[in-house]
Image (cartoon, rainbow, N blue to C red):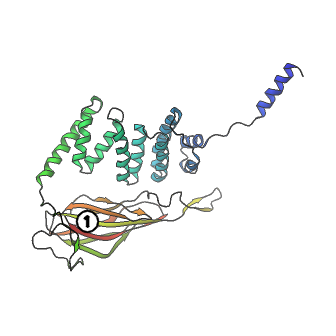
Amino acid sequence: MSSLASLALIALVCSAAPPAAPSGLDQVLKLLGQQKCDDAFELVAKVEVPNPPTPASLKAAKAVAKGAAACRASDAGVALTFSALALRLAPSEDEVVVAHAEGLMAVQEPVDAAATLDALIAAQPVKKAPKAWMMRAKMAHGFGDYEEAVRLLTSLAAEPATKKEAEPLLATAKEGLEKRKEISFPPPRPDAVEKPLAETKPAETKPAAGRPAAGQVVAVFDGSQIGLGGEQVLKAKLVKGQSYVFKATGQCTRSMREFLDEDGNVIRVKPVDTRGPVFGMDFRVQFGAQDSRSLSAGVGEPDENRLTFVADADEEAIRVFDSSNPGKEVTCTMGQFSVVAQ
């Protein structure tokens, strides 16, 4: 066979070879670019994440994070799956970590959002992770954690790039911290333990003479429980100006998710993680006229909530309610309410 014929045969064989199939990550990126969020969601499990991260994975992580932001308006839970993938691709990238924290906030998971930011802040100085530092500082400020806000904002105010944004927040955080120091409560006894009173029903609870001892259970609301969309007002006889701990237990169970195939048939799919976080949860509690605060509900294992508050009336109205939008695949309840003197 002549050399020319050999070259022609090789070219023919090469042209007949099938093109390499796109990777799972390539398919996800393509679908996200087309804003086909549900289709991309079905392929996330097929994505292989390089270890350690590569320059290519860093570029892909930023693209996935951008796609997550675009999907968030239609389904915050699905979008969180993408930002979590981006975080796996580039766990130390400031922009990617902040994107995932924003996704967690969108599904009412502030504790996890703070933990995600804290992990990067502990490893990176302000110069290398200014967005994470700033978001975490704003969260601490918004939650009234002025001590943490002052710590973070002091570092941010020392950097030229973040000084202008940080200084006003630092001033208000310092002011809030000083005002809080003006409120004094008697220190808890070192040997204090929680002991229920003889009378613990909501209608029968009575304040102890003066201030109840630290650790003393002053109200138990037996049988009180709310579910998704529920609301209940609990009445407790407290001492105005004293600090208390409100306890509540939240729990969710996850059922099958339902999808429609191309023919309109319902397909029931078991969740990838039946014990993972429930997206869209928004159980809340409001003490008197104070701002409402979040309550968490665990999947499988219950979450024990302990929120410290200062009574603004001798007969405090404690409103527990739910504004969740978690989807129909979960059933959640909040109950086992009690109040303990601090």
**In this image, 233 relative to 257: left or right?**
left
Q: Where the C terminus falls, by quadrant?
A: bottom left
**Mark 1, other Cα within 10 Å: few <14 / some 14–19 / many ≥20:** many
Image quadrant where one finds the N terminus: top right
Residue at 59% x, 47% y: name it.
46
291 lies above or below 25: below
Give x and y (percent) for residue 250: 37, 66
Identify residue for label 1. Answer: 246
Q: Nearer the viewer, residue 111 or 323?
A: 111
Left or right: 111, with 182 as reference point: right
Residue, far right: 1
The quadrant where residue 186 appears = bottom left
Give percent across and percent down for residue 102.
39, 46
Residue at image x 54%, y 64%? 256
Q: At which x and y percent is residue 106? A: 39, 51
Please state which amino acid type lies under the numbered disc 1: Phe
Please count the marks in the image: 1
The residue at the far front in this view is: 191
Image-based side of 304 in relation to 193, left or right = right
Determine the secondary structure under disc 1: strand
